[in-house]
Image (cartoon, rainbow, N blue to C red):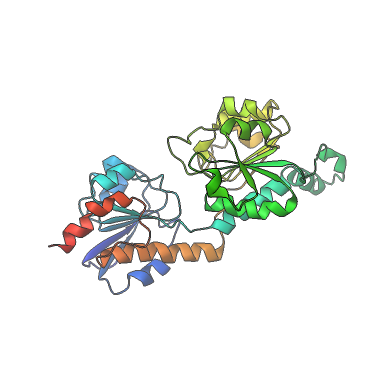
Amino acid sequence: MVDKKGKFKVVFTDSHLFKPREELEALKGLDCEIVQAVCKSEEETIAVCRDAHAVLNTSAKIGRRVIEELKEALVICRYGIGVDTVDIPAATEHGIIVANVPDFCFDEVADTAMSMILSVPRKVHLLNALVHQGIWKKDAAKPVHKFRGATLGIYAFGNIGRNLCRKAEPFGFRILVHDPYLTSESVRGYPVTLVDFDTLLKESDLISVHAPLTEETRHKFDETAFRKMKPSAFFFNLGRGPIHDQKALTRAVKEGWIAGAGLDVLEKEPPDADDPILKLDKVVFTPHYASYTEEAYRELQVKTGENAAAVLRGDFPKYVFNGEVRANARLLKRAAR
C-alpha cells in the first residue's frame, strides 16, 4: 500500500506483523508518502527502501548490502528492544540513526518467563494433555520438586532479568546471575549472587535466558554448556533463538542431560514441521509471543512512530541505539542544507 507522494518517504518493511496505526498519528502533518510492504528478501527491501527517509523494521534483515543502497535514509526504527536485524556498524558508518524502544515489554516477558518456570517443572502441560485424553493420573508427573530453596539462574540481568528476579523472589528461589557487563556493586539491592558462566550452569536448577543476540551470545548454550547442567535442571529461552544451539538442546533433552525446557524462541522461526525438537514432550513452546499484550504493542507502535517523526522533524529521537552516529548523522547534514 502506498499513500500519496510527499516530502518524506516512510517504509514499513513488515506491515503484516505491525499494521500501522499509532505510527500514522505520530507522522501526521509531516507530508509523508507511506509505503506498507512485506519484505522477505534483501532484494525486496532494497527495492522498496532505496529512496526511503525512514524505515520502520521488525523482521526484515537490513544488513550492510541493504544499508549501502539506502541513499536517503535518515533513520531505521526497530520495533522492540533488540536490533539484531540491523547491521549497526554499517548504519553508523553511513550516518543512519538506529532507534529502538528499550523500555518495551519488561513485564510481559518476565511474566511469560515466570509462567514457564512455574508450570514446566510441575509438568502442567503433560498433565493437561493426559486429562484431555481421559487419563486422570497425577503420578505421570513424577518427579516434581519444590521451588523454595531451588536455584534459579538468570542469564543477562538487564531490565527484563531484573523484573523476573523481583517476580521470582517471593517463591523462595536462590537466585544466581551471570552477566559479564555487571559488577557486584551494580546488582546491589537485588537478592542475587553474581557468578561466572560455569557456576551458573552447574548450580542452577532452572536457567532463564534474557540476553540480546550478539556474536558473544550466539550458541552460548551449546553441547558443552548443556552437559555441565544438572540432569534435573530446566532451560528457558525468552531472549533470541540462536543463543541456544538447537541441535544440542534437542539432544540434551532427548538423552537426559537436562530435564526439560521452555522456549519462546527458536533458531528458525517458524520451525520446520519435521524439526525433532517439536516431538519432545519435555519441551514447552510459545511462538515468540512473550512480549505481547495489547497494551504493550500499542505503546510500542506509538514510540516507534515517535522515533521516526522526531528524525523527520530534524531532531534526534528519544531512543538512539547507535550513539556514535551523533557525530556524522545524515540528519545533521540535511539540517545544514
The residue that appears at 18% across and 63% down in the rendered structure is: 335
Q: Is residue 76 left or right of residue 328?
A: right
Quadrant in which residue 51 is drawn = bottom left
Residue most extreme to the front: 185
Quadrant in which residue 121 is drawn = top right
Residue most extreme to the bottom: 29
Q: Is residue 130 left or right of residue 241?
A: right
The residue that appears at 22% across and 59% down in the rendered structure is: 331
Q: Is residue 252 left or right of residue 13?
A: right
The residue that appears at 72% across and 54% down in the rendered structure is: 170
Above or below, comparing residue 252 to residue 205 in the picture: above
Percent across and percent down for residue 253 are 67, 31
The N terminus lies in quadrant: bottom left
Q: Nearer the viewer, residue 93 or 47?
A: 93
Percent across and percent down for residue 262 are 64, 42
Is residue 55 visible to the viewer in this orientation of the structure? yes
How many numbered marks does the figure carry? 0
Above or below, comparing residue 221 to residue 84 in the picture: above
